[in-house]
Image: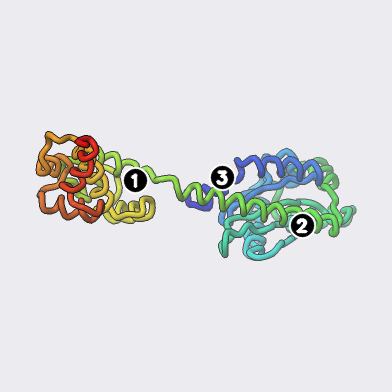
Amino acid sequence: MNNDTTLLDALRRSEIYRDYERAYSDATGLPIALCGSETWEPPFRGKARENSFCALMGTRNPTCAGCLRMQEKIASAATDRVVTAKCHFGLTEAAVPLKLGQKTIGFLRTGQVFTQQPDAAQFRKAAATMRRMGLNLDPGKVREAYMATRVMPHNQLLSATRLLRIFAEHLVMKANQIAVRQANIEPLAVVRAKEYIRQHLHEDITLADTAKAACVSSFTICKLFRRHTGATFTEHVSRLRIEKAAELLLNPRLRISEIAFKSGFQSLTHFNRVFRKLVGESPTLYREKLVLPLAA
C-alpha cells in the first residue's frame, strides 16, 4: 500500500469526511466518493444513493470497462480543475482533484445524473448501445432504472461541484495534518532496531546485525534512522551509550574504565572522546560536579 492510498484511507475514516458525505448526499440526493488517482473501480458501487441504472449496468463486464475508461479520462483532465463528463449512456459525472502541494492524491467524485429529462428517443439510443455491447438484461428493468435516474440541471450540478471544491480544500488541510502525524510515527524497522540496540548496548553493535534484527537492509536502516531520529545510526548508538555512562557515573565505586566498557565502548580513549564531544566535558570532570554538592 503506497502513501497516497494510506492517506486516502485515513481521510475516508475521518469524522469530517463522514459528516460531509452524509450532509452532501442528504442535500443533493447524490452519492459522493473519495477515489485514488490510480484506483480504477466503479466509484459509487455499494453507496446508499448509487444510481440504480449504473448499478444494473455494473453487473456486466462490457459496461464496467466503459465506466473505467471514463474514470481514467476524468482523472487525466481533473488535475487542476473540476471536470464533468458523460458516459456512453448519457449520464454525467464530476470530479474535483485533491492536491497536496503540487501532487494530486485523489478525487472527490459525484454525479451519475442527467442534466435534462431523458425522453424515449434518448432511451432508444442507449438501448441500441447496449445491444451493440452484447448486453442481455431485462428491458423493462433497464428502462425503469434509466428513466428514474436523477435529473440535475447543469447550473445545479455546477453548484454541487462548488460544494465539492470547498470540501476538497478542507480535506487537503486534514490530509496535511494526517501526513505530518504519519511522518512522525516511527516505522516498525526503526522500533525493532532501537529495541535491539537497547538490549545489546554493552556489546559491540554492528550496523549489519541491527539491520538483520530490524528485517531490512543496512542501507535502509541508515536511511530510516536519519529520517526518523535526526541522527545517523552511529550517532544514535553513541548517544544511548553516553546516557548509560552518565547514569553509571553516579556510582562512585565504579572506575571510569569500568563505566566505559559497561556502556559498550571498546576503548577508554574512544569513550573519553565521545563523552567530551556529546557532554562538553570529560567523564572525570562530569563526575566531580555530581559529587561536589554531596560533599558540601
Find residue 142 and report its horizontal and vertical position in percent: 79, 44
Q: Dot 2 corresponds to which residue?
A: 162
Secondary element under disc 3, as helix, strand or loop, is helix
Instruction: Return the disc, 2 or 3, that comes first in the chain's sequence.
Output: 3
Find residue 105 and report its horizontal and vertical position in percent: 57, 56
**Residue 140 shows which numbered tag?**
none
Residue at point 48% right, 47% down? 182
Q: How was this image coloured?
A: rainbow
Amino acid at dot 1: Val
Q: Are marks 3 and 1 in contact (CB under 8 Å)?
A: no
Instruction: Give the Cα distance between marks 3 and 1.
Output: 24 Å
Amino acid at dot 2: Arg
Secondary element under disc 2, as helix, strand or loop, is helix
* Placement of the C terminus among the 4 image quadrants: top left
Q: Dot 3 corresponds to which residue?
A: 9
Question: How many residues crowd mark 3 within 10 Å: few (<14), some (14–19), many (20+)?
Answer: some
Question: How many residues crowd mark 2 within 10 Å: few (<14), some (14–19), many (20+)?
Answer: some
Secondary element under disc 1, as helix, strand or loop, is helix
Instruction: Give the Cα distance between marks 2 and 3.
Output: 23 Å
Amino acid at dot 3: Asp
Mark 2 or 1, which is nearer the eye? 1
Instruction: Return the disc, 2 or 1, that comes first in the chain's sequence.
Output: 2
- Comparing 26 with 256, the one in front is 256
Residue at point 65% right, 65% down? 80
Q: Dot 1 corresponds to which residue?
A: 190
